[in-house]
Image (cartoon, rainbow, N blue to C red):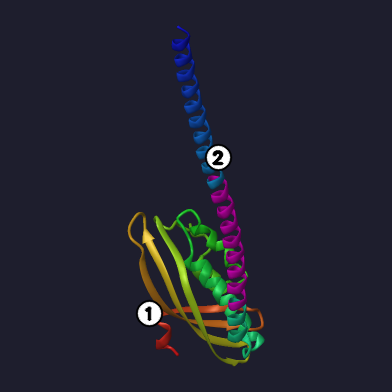
Amino acid sequence: MKRGLIVIISVICVALLVSLYGNIYQHSKISKANNTISQVKKDKQKVSKKLATANRENDVLNSQVDNFKTYQNNKDKSQSELNFNNVANKFLTTMFTFEPDTYSNRKDSIKGLISTDLYNQYFPKNTNYGDANSVTSKLDNATIYTQAKQGNSMKGLAVVSFESKSGDNDWKKETDLYQLTFDTSTNQLTAVQNLGSSFKASDVK
């Protein structure tokens, strides 16, 4: 009887030891897994911080490059040429960038950029200014080539690349060439003439 009791107690002890070892082993695995997860999170945070720093540095570098390009492009230009480029770019951006619900806003946006006569050509008085007929447009690039100034008048060519689409249709790219006339005394465009499509910058250099 005593011997049987001893055997039972021994079996129970062994079972308890096995269970205890299993719990310790399982706890060790969970602890290691938690440590690994914690380290991965820390590493991820470090990588995220480094990536954020790299992105900021890249943005600063790109900004410096853009500023240098602008400086190089403008350093040999007169104030009249700079004003011409500035007004022409604002005008072209406004006229070629719109959505159906912002199309009519162009009427107010270009005031001051063009002369009264040119404004009335684009937006005649007592005329109901329509909508864009579901057309969306965006300006990709506008390159301005100024010509010699004669009195208060300066002319230039603008190579305008833009994309447009109607409704859900695909975007269509187009490049037009415009002749611009600029009044240096008022800093306004006085004439805009479309010379045709399918031009590129190299055609007018």
Majority secondary structure in the magenta region: helix
Q: Secondary structure at mark 1?
A: strand
Q: Position of residue 97 (x, y in %)?
A: 48, 64
| C-alpha span from label 1 to label 2 | 73 Å
Quickly name the residue at label 1: 196
Q: Which residues are magenta?
A: 37-65
Residue sitting nearer the eye, 8 or 90: 8
- Which badge, 1 or 2, comes first in the chain's sequence? 2
Quickly name the residue at label 2: 31
Residue shown at 57%/46% (left/top)?
A: 38
Q: Can residue 115 be seen in the rendering of this structure? A: no
Which amino acid does the dot numbered 1 rest on?
Gly
Q: Secondary structure at mark 2?
A: helix
The dot on residue 36 is: none
Which amino acid does the dot numbered 2 rest on?
Ser
Residue sitting nearer the eye, 168 or 150: 168
Residue sitting nearer the eye, 109 or 18: 18
Q: Position of residue 198 (x, y in %)?
A: 35, 79
**Residue 204 colored in magenta in the image:** no
